[in-house]
Amino acid sequence: MLVVCVSSTDSVVVSCADVMLIAFGATTTGSVSTTQEIEYAGRLAARASAWAETYLGYPLTLQVYSETLAGYGGPEIMLSRTPLVRVLRFFDSTATCEATAICSSDFRVEDAAAGLLSRDGGWRWTNDRREGETPFNLGLAGAYLPGRETRPWLIEYVAGYRVTGSTVTCMGVSSGHDAYTTQATLPDDIVQGVAVRAAEFYANPMGVTSRRVGDLAVTYGSADAGPTGAAAILEPYRRLV
């Protein structure tokens, strides 16, 4: 089970100025910009940011999560949300009143981008033995059945990218620690991809693939050509589960 405990106040990951520069060829301080254009650029930025999260398959901005995980007996365990910024609390049971807290010295962050945590003693396999059950009619009573793992490992953590000036509140306390409030960590490629998608929304708000006016025909893309435009920029960052 994955629960969002606290969300970042940032939901738009590209500035209005970047959208205006790419979509309109103007800036918010330029004489050609109007109030309506600035407001529209802001809506395009919000729409493109939401599209990017859907396309990539995970939230981009900082959030605090509570997640229960299954163990498979190996040395590593994987979180659902990335990139991992900080582990707040870790227990060996979902009943925290009876659980044993796992100290930060007892595990390591092997890969923050992939959300991998490792432990020398491994993570015990959480598949309960089912007495009297016979899987696949093979006569194997009392076997461990696939897909029956329980999720006793409870972890609370911060994951996501920081947008410039972003702050996240953890456990009801706003922290000034560098893990929560620093300069942006959002990759430039993602920012660029979102800005390009906003420009695509501006140029083609109806989402049509082609247009014809008299002898002039314009094709915006083909489903058989693979990712193009903003999608091609963001493709390396997709996480498909």
Image (spheres, rainbow, N blue to C red):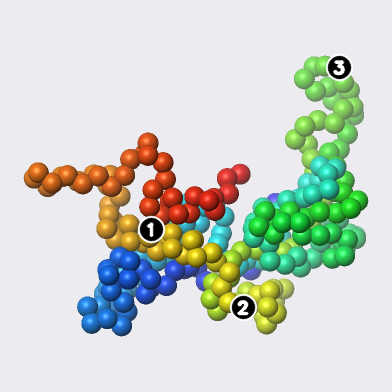
Q: Which of 201 and 109 is in front in this view?
A: 109
State how far apart marks 2 and 3 are (Cα).
59 Å
The answer to whether residue 65 is seen in the rendering is no
User: Residue 190 vs residue 152: left or right?
Assistant: left
Is the residue under label 3 in contact with that under label 2 (CB below 8 Å)? Answer: no
User: Residue 194 vs residue 148: left or right?
Assistant: left
Q: Quadrant of residue 72?
A: top right
Q: Can you give x and y, in whole percent of width and height, for residue 25 in the image? A: 27, 70
- Compared to residue 229, the image places residue 177 above or below, namely below
The label on residue 19 is none
> Dot 1: within a 10 Å radius of its alpha carbon, few (fewer than 14), some, or many (20 or more) residues?
many
Q: Quadrant of residue 36?
A: bottom left
State how far apart marks 3 and 1 are (Cα).
57 Å
Q: What residue is shown at x 83% (from left), y 48% (from top)?
A: 75
Q: Can you give x and y, in whole percent of width and height, for residue 241 in the image? A: 61, 44
User: Residue 8 vs residue 231: left or right?
Assistant: right
The residue wearing badge 1 is 197
Q: What residue is shown at x 85% (from left), y 43% (from top)?
A: 73
> Dot 2: within a 10 Å radius of its alpha carbon, few (fewer than 14), some, or many (20 or more) residues?
some
Q: What residue type is labelled 3?
A: Gly
Q: What residue is shown at x 43% (from left), y 63% (from top)?
A: 192
Q: Which of marks 3 and 1 is nearer the N terminus?
A: 3
The residue wearing badge 3 is 139
Q: What residue is shown at x 56% (from left), y 73% (from top)?
A: 184
State how far apart marks 1 and 2 are (Cα).
26 Å
Q: Earlier in the sequence, mark 2 or mark 3?
A: 3
The residue wearing badge 2 is 182
Q: What element carries label 1?
A: helix
- Compared to residue 82, the image places residue 34 above or below, namely below
Q: Which amino acid does label 2 sit on?
A: Thr
Residue projecting furthest to the left? 214
